[in-house]
Image: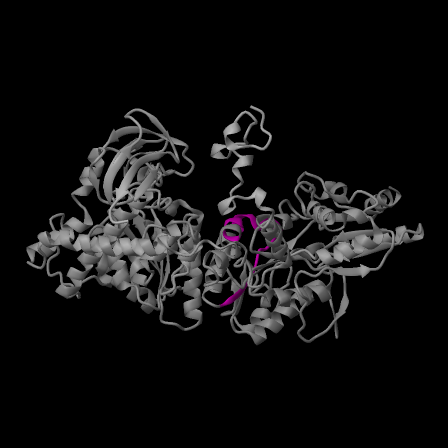
Amino acid sequence: MKVMNIVQAINDALDIKLKEDRSIIVYGEDVGVEGGVFRVTEDLQLKHGAGRIFDSPLAESGIVGTALGMAIAGLKPVVEMQFDGFVYPAMNQIISHVGRFRNRTRGKFTVPMVIRIPYGGGINALEHHSESPEAYFGHTPGLKVVIPSTPYDAKGLLIAAIEDPDPVIYLEPKRIYRAIKQEVPEEKYSIPIGKAKVLSSGEHITVVAYGAMIREVQKAMVKAKEQGISVELIDLRSIFPVDRDTIRQSVQKTGRILIVTEAAQSYGPAAEIISIVNEEAFLSLEAPPTRLTGFDTVIPLPLGEKHYMLSPERIFSEIKKVVSY
Amino acid sequence: MFDIQSLEKYKPIDNKMYQVMDNDGNVMLKDWKTALSDDQIVKAYKDLLFERTVDNMAVSYQRQGRMFTYPPNLGQEAIHIAAGQVIKEEDWLAPAFRELGVWLAKGVSLWEIFLYFKGNEDGSKFLKANRMLPVSVPIASQLVHAAGLGFAMKYNKEEAAVFGFVGDGGTSEGDFHEALNFAAVWDAPVVFVVQNNQFAISVPLKMQTRSINLAVKGLAYDVSSILVDGNDFFAMHDVLSFAREYVLKENRPFLIEAKTFRRGAHTTSDDPTRYRTKEEEEAWEAKDPALRLQKYLVNKGLWDPKDEAELVAQYKKQIDTEFEKAESYQEYKLDDVFGFMYETMPDELKRQKNMYENFLNMDSRFHGNDGKMDSRFHGNDGRMDTHSQGDNGISGGAK
Amino acid sequence: MRYMFKFPDIGEGLEEGKIIQWYVDKGQAVNSGDPVVKMETDKVVTDIPSPKTGVIAARFGAVGETVHVGNVLIEIEIEGV
């Protein structure tokens, strides 16, 4: 066991896989010599060589498209989009090809690749550095999409993503890159993609969240506990496929659900979870399934960001509303 | 003999084009020799005729309603046949969508091509062709795949080249530039072939770029390039053979601009009379690749045009047989809509598939044959029946 | 055997076309691939070839008339069956 934060956990996962599988190629902007602008890939080039982990030209569509070519030829590329806001030039390759290549060749060619993307706000960043684009990927057929909230999950999910025969979008909540330290096994392990995790058992309300929001919900839960509200917290972990069973079982128990996401409201992941709740556990509901999300605005620059980012106070207020319905 | 010195003689920046034959099939270059035997050249011409015959019949099948939208290859066959002769089995081919002769040379079965254009993804399985990517509709997006494939070949220490095709319109797309750049930075063995057929649907080349030609764009990426007469089979063969050797030996990409003319429409949904003149089309007819190669062979006494009708009739029978294979292919399976999205079908897709299967298996009053809605609930054209259309026998319909 | 050749959607979502010229008459022999009629649609003006080899048993529509996609253009008597 070793104490790691999320950055270190991701680095460890990459290190382990690079060591054991020669077909893994890691590249992106600044990931080689510098080790990535967040230092996630630090020292990996020293350990595994510039032939396998290197800096690419500044061209996101090219990074993803060349990775697809490599994957078709039997390699396993793990590429990085430097920031969430920079993945957009690659959307054509992701939607038109990465998600489709297995289907359109009837499995003759497959795409075992991973796209790592630091995402989310709350770090006082420049414009276009605080996006929550997970809904675009969840909506794209042929992809898997995962978001860890702890170092343990970060390592396990990334290893699972790299070993998955299908393309995985791996979103890294940069706000909590270094905020959480945890004991993490040093050996290789993986967490199955498509499984949510019940972080706390509760009676009165189910709260579903993921990524950096987990910590904020946990802060709200302290206040809730003081007022006698018992919250069952589910870390979704997998945007697609979604773990319906865990959600259903929880709502059947509590009868109330609040989904908390940083992403903008309209057509976002929270709406998807509400639809799932309707399909799976409607008759168990004692209150309308409710979402608490970002606004349908662009996330403001740092001085205005506090209005957009969901605070424990807002989360608690919403929990109370749903519980009091 | 096209060699590394030729690159100096035919610099794209000087707008010099490499050409071997004139329009009448006479070799213009002094001391020019080909490595091809007479038999190989005759075969090339026959292959050219075959591609053209397939192409014409494909358009006809589409007009008969037996096939869907199809992009004709008319006028560009010399490029395809030459490339088909040069590309080896271990090489990768990343096509755009107008390279019929190259696909066939790579081992794609004709019935597979027909099956694809009839609307079944099984046509892209390429049972007998290795290392060929399916057609790429998002323009130029295949070129970055080609760059990645080139990297992989080097990484795996394989002596294999990658051929990425694109049209003149595609050279405006970002992926064209990203691909050339990546391939150059990575020293990847990729031959980029730009088929400049003068039109991107209706948009002529002069509205596509201010560059003096398309080959010159390689200069920006330090990618060596050549502008070549795409309707000249020998010129294409010379350049493509050289290019393949070059990328493997030098570990550098290479860019070919093959200047040609799209004698047909963009696709069967396009009408060129809306944007170009008969004069333009006729001028290029005189430069037709089949015509020139035929004249060369006739001059050499290697071909008698009187033999063509019979040969083409033979080809037509062959092609009809392949088309019938595609037409009698098994029905599109519901399983296949869901079955290839992932290696293991996720629960959610299973759920959606089950729901749909339940609908299909429902009470037959809601289903006629083919899963089409029972006519008691629909009039002609699928419009909802009204009570006054009593002829359909609506139960209790008042007249 | 009578084969009914219906006007196909040749242009991705066309509803109808106008007959510009007939190339065949009732009683005429046709080979598969021979043009039978010239149609004008929103996208293209084009010849429509016969899908079968046989004899034209019937022809529907006059020059200038609009034909809906899915309506029969010609009936072909196919030999042998």
Residue B209 in the image: state x and y as whole percent. Answer: 35, 41
Q: Is residue B333 left or right of residue A2?
A: left
* Residue B157 location, quadrant: bottom left
Query: Do we see residue A284 in this rendering?
Result: yes
Instruction: Give yes or no for residue A210 being in the magenta stretch.
Output: no
The magenta stretch is A75-94
Give me the residue at 18% from left, 61% from top. B43
Location of the N terminus of chain C (image quadrant): top left
Taking the image as shown, residue B89 lies to the left or right of residue A41, namely left
Q: Can you give x and y, in whole percent of width and height, for residue A99 in the image?
A: 53, 55
Q: Residue furthest right?
A: A227
Residue drawn at point x = 73 percent, y = 51 percent = A280
Is residue A15 depicted above or below B359 in this figure?
below
| Image location (x, y in percent) of residue A75 | 49, 68
As displayed, is residue B122 above or below residue B199?
below
Q: Nearer the viewer, residue A60 or A108?
A: A108
